[in-house]
Amino acid sequence: MTTNDISSQYLIAPDPLATRLTRAVDGHDETGAPVTISVVEERPLTIFLNKREIVTAMTIGDYPKYLALGFLRNQGMLSDDDRIIGVDYDDDIDTVVVRTAVETDYEDKLARKTRTSGCAVGTVFGDMMEGLEGLTLPPAPLKTSWLYALAQTINRTPSLYLEAGAIHGTVLCQEDRPLVYMEDVGRHNAVDKVAGWMLSEAVAGADKILYTTGRLTSEMVIKTAQMGIPVLVSRSGFTAWGVEIAREVGLTLIGRMRGQRFTCLSGEDRLIRDIDPAHVVHEDRKHRRKGAKA
Amino acid sequence: MTTNDISSQYLIAPDPLATRLTRAVDGHDETGAPVTISVVEERPLTIFLNKREIVTAMTIGDYPKYLALGFLRNQGMLSDDDRIIGVDYDDDIDTVVVRTAVETDYEDKLARKTRTSGCAVGTVFGDMMEGLEGLTLPPAPLKTSWLYALAQTINRTPSLYLEAGAIHGTVLCQEDRPLVYMEDVGRHNAVDKVAGWMLSEAVAGADKILYTTGRLTSEMVIKTAQMGIPVLVSRSGFTAWGVEIAREVGLTLIGRMRGQRFTCLSGEDRLIRDIDPAHVVHEDRKHRRKGAKA
């Protein structure tokens, strides 16, 4: 399959050649020879909810509206009850304004939350567990053949990562099909863009799988659960609290997924082992994420 | 050299066997066989400045006092004029209180800053460029032999990364000697712990090198500059804004440093190429960070 064929399988695939997302930067290599390398952009995007400035995120700059919507939703600042009447992006001043029919109760939230910001993993407005009380995800069956198919497709998809490195990716999937592949300098931004797309398109999470290149921290697990997605998969490792929360809310958590190998630390009873790992093709070196040039 | 010998070269080396920092978690591998893996902890630490609660960071939990001091310093909430009269850590309630002789002007800062939090790269209190106006780092010469020696020592140092993965490391170095090696679930925490140590020990940055496993984003470059350190080195890649700021403040920026290779995007004129890269030993697979198990 050519790489073009791979990208065309997605509803939204990365656009590694978009001129706005990377920049050619001159430098020198280890021998002193001049080199020009492709480097990802990182630019501020200020998000407003109605008249109030909420946050300035550092982002590569694609899909600003999805990022704004997903950020506000994942922070609990937009609920199901809030009717969105407009999302305006102004690229001159790097600003998105999300407007709701009725003023939201975000000001209360903002006042209460800013003091407990969980900075370490990128969460700005603390009280991270809010919205998870009593949440139980649907016990979705997960075939291991889907996992291998997804990893193989995603790793071979042309991406900003393969083009320029230094970027995280998050992919919304259904069974063995990747649907929406977002990348960003912050992995929480990539997840928020997926969440914003789901909100815009009224897509449910219950039958989806979220694949991320980043670590399975508490923040990633919480965001995934808030999006109603019962399966989270990563090439990277776990944190203890991430595992604990996943087990509490019934989220299937698969990490260290590389080639034939993976580790399941939550949801083992939902796994359907329909393929012999020995028959899975090894990753070739070029597409071994994190073995490449980032 | 044995790994013990390596650790003993540091003033502070990682303690991968500390029981508080990792947890054995049961799960299953790809064949369904039960496995028990070592997973890093991630716990909240709430930082107070005098009577005011500032932030709750998610951290592995070592060196809470350094993390608190470094966070407050790197956020501009503690200045050179603030005399610190106490740093109290209470491990029952995961809290550090930093006390100053005279109340600081942090309340003003807090009110002004929270609204523009740059969430994407972990910065909680925005206005990131503050404190960089007019800053120019000393034009410190940098021998490439130091870079290779540092990378080789650091990659072979026993660490939580090698033990459990899913963690970032930051190492304060001087010439070819690594001094202080901090790890954390958030790479900004690892940097803040280094900054806290420097503040506690009154160590200057002008003759130091900062080595990080994370990407060279604007946030990393700004923190390094604020610590007065003129050289930042990473295995990972760059962002365009990180490069731009490094060039503005005169910070030498080396990325994609793996085995014999590296790329210099700022400060080329300060590099002293005193070793032929062809004579540098290749990284062996076991110690190839990011090629390992995280």
Image (tube, coloured by chain):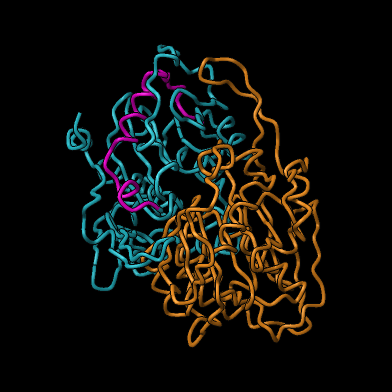
Chain colours: A cyan, B orange
Residue at 55% x, 76% y is B141
Quarter that holds the N terminus of chain A = top left
Does B164 sit above or below residue B10?
Answer: above
In the image, A11 versus A42, the foreground residue is A42
Q: Is residue B124 visible?
A: no
> Where on the picture, by quarter, is residue A46?
bottom left
Percent x, y of residue B132: 50, 81
Magenta stretch, overall SS = helix
Percent x, y of residue A211: 40, 36
Percent x, y of residue B3: 73, 44
In the image, A106 versus A224, the foreground residue is A224
Q: Is residue A280 magenta?
A: no
> Where on the picture, by quarter, is residue A155?
top left
The segment highlighted magenta reads A136-165
Query: Is residue A216 left or right of B18 when viewed as pictured?
Result: left
In the image, B61 versus A221, the foreground residue is B61
Residue at 32% x, 68% y is A26
Q: Is residue A4 visible?
A: yes
In the image, B232 versus B219, the foreground residue is B232
Residue at 39% x, 35% y is A285
Percent x, y of residue B91: 80, 53
Does A20 sit above or below residue A280?
Answer: below
Q: Is residue A140 magenta?
A: yes
